[in-house]
Amino acid sequence: MQKAMSILTLATLLGLLMSTASAGGTVQKITLTMRDFSYTPAKVVLQAGVPAEITVINKGKVTHEFMLHIKPKSSGTPAHEWAEENSYFRGLQVVVEGRGAEVRRHGASIYEINVGAEKTAVVKFTPAKKGTFEFACLIQGHYEQGMKGTFTVE
Ligand SMILES: [Cu+2]
């Protein structure tokens, strides 16, 4: 009886695996480490149309933001409102998981993910727009100290 059960379980698992594979399967998984005051890596490249999962780990001593927006034209710190309005996440379905992650929304769209010290957030979305964008922490003083990176979608 127990053997029959385990074979059944195995068959179910195989079926699940196969259905995942046939649905396109791949997920682009990236780990982004935050420190006071940097992101590692500072360059992220993703493929458009393929689901992405970015694990954002804050190894710093203070809370940091993960904002993703079009590349600012000037080198100064972008205004928070500007980054919100020009968020890459606008109109995209974004799911954020993880304790210690606080999310801010514009209507239905997430535009800001706050990750507490020593916390982790998992950000799931499927990149649509191609081009070069910027991820950044816009908490006062952080961007100026280098808390930004390049986000490219091909
Ligand atoms: Cu920061």
Image (tube, grey):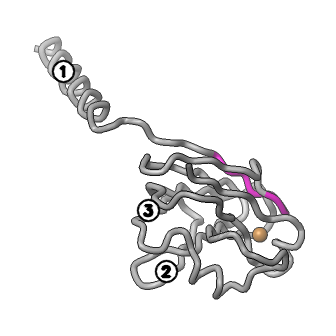
Mark closest to the chain's N terminus, 2 or 1 = 1
Q: CA distance from mark 3 to mark 1?
A: 30 Å
Image quadrant of residue 99?
A: bottom right
Q: Amino acid at mark 2?
A: Arg
Give the vertical position of 141 relative to 132 (above or below).
Answer: below
Q: Main secondary structure of the magenta part?
A: strand
Q: Amino acid at mark 1?
A: Ala
Q: Position of residue 107 (x, y in %)?
A: 42, 84
| Residue to which mark 2 is pinned | 105
Location of ligand 1 given as a quarter of the image: bottom right
Answer yes or no: disc 2 within 8 Å of ligand 1.
Answer: no
Give the vertical position of 138 relative to 36 (above or below).
Answer: below
Question: How dense is the environment of label 3, judged by Cα within 10 Å: few (below 14), some, or many (20 and up)?
Answer: few
- Within the magenta stretch, is there residue 34? yes
| Residue to which mark 1 is pinned | 11
Q: Amino acid at mark 3?
A: Val
Q: Position of residue 39 (x, y in %)?
A: 77, 56
Disc 1 element:
helix
Residue situated in front as seen by the camera: 108 or 97: 108
Give the vertical position of 120 relative to 146 (above or below).
Answer: above
Labelled disc at residue 95: 3
Left or right for 50, reference 9: right
Mark closest to the chain's N terminus, 3 or 2 = 3
Give the vertical position of 105 relative to 16 (above or below).
Answer: below
